Amino acid sequence: MDPSSEQDLLRSDAVPEVGEDAAATVNMTENLSEEEQEELRKELAKVEEEIQTLSQVLAAKEKHLAEIKRKLGINSLQELKQNITKGWQDVTSTSAYKKTSETLSQAGQKASAAFSSVGSVITKKLEDVKNSSTFKSFEEKVENLKSKVGGAKPAGGDFGEVLNSAANASATETITEQIQEESQ
């Protein structure tokens, strides 16, 4: 490299800031003696050499790391899982997460209490419907229909018993049919 191109590399002409007069910038190399410039050139070369050496060492370390991971059977997916797990642990240990979690827990408890009270209201309404004259009339009609179709029923049965007996009869018929098919 010729001395004039070295000089061009070492020039540190400042770029003028917005609103700064370009003529007001000072050429720093003009203020340095030949001796100071030579000292800075040597330091620059030394730093560049150190950077090159460190880059080579880093590349060798990365290659060694990849070889160790290969021998241990660690692949990218496992590393991703580990990173996600660690990230999640980091997130859950933050005060913001803890506060949010606590707030959501309280909201969940309040929602649970609200659903419970809604459930109680619905249960009461269903009991009211069951005790209404319209439902009683419907229940009587179903019982009359059952007695006509399935024979006389002892007194005291309710709509729930009618549904249960119908379900049991259906299940019994299915089991009987399966047994008959298997025996043939």
Image: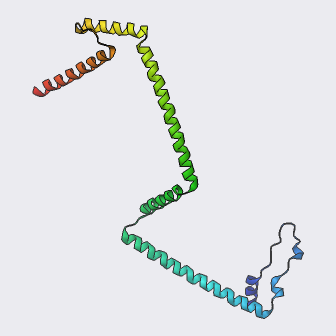
The percent position of residue 11, horizontal first and vertical second, equals 77, 82
Closer to us: 93 or 64: 93
Image quarter hosting the C terminus: top left
- Which residue is rendered at x = 48% and y = 75% of the image? 62
Q: Up-down: is 53 above or below 120?
A: below
Q: Up-down: is 182 above or below 81?
A: above
Q: Up-down: is 59 above or below 115?
A: below
- Which residue is rendered at x = 84% and y = 66% of the image? 18
The percent position of residue 125, horizontal first and vertical second, equals 46, 19
Closer to us: 26 or 178: 178
How many numbered markers are drawn? Answer: 0
Image quarter hosting the N terminus: bottom right
Closer to us: 127 or 19: 127
Q: Is residue 1 visible?
A: no
The percent position of residue 41, horizontal first and vertical second, equals 71, 88
Q: Up-down: is 126 above or below 142?
A: below
**Which coloring applies here?**
rainbow
Position of 136 with respect to 100 (left or right) is left
- Which residue is rendered at x = 46% and y = 58% of the image? 85
Position of 140 with respect to 115 (left or right) is left
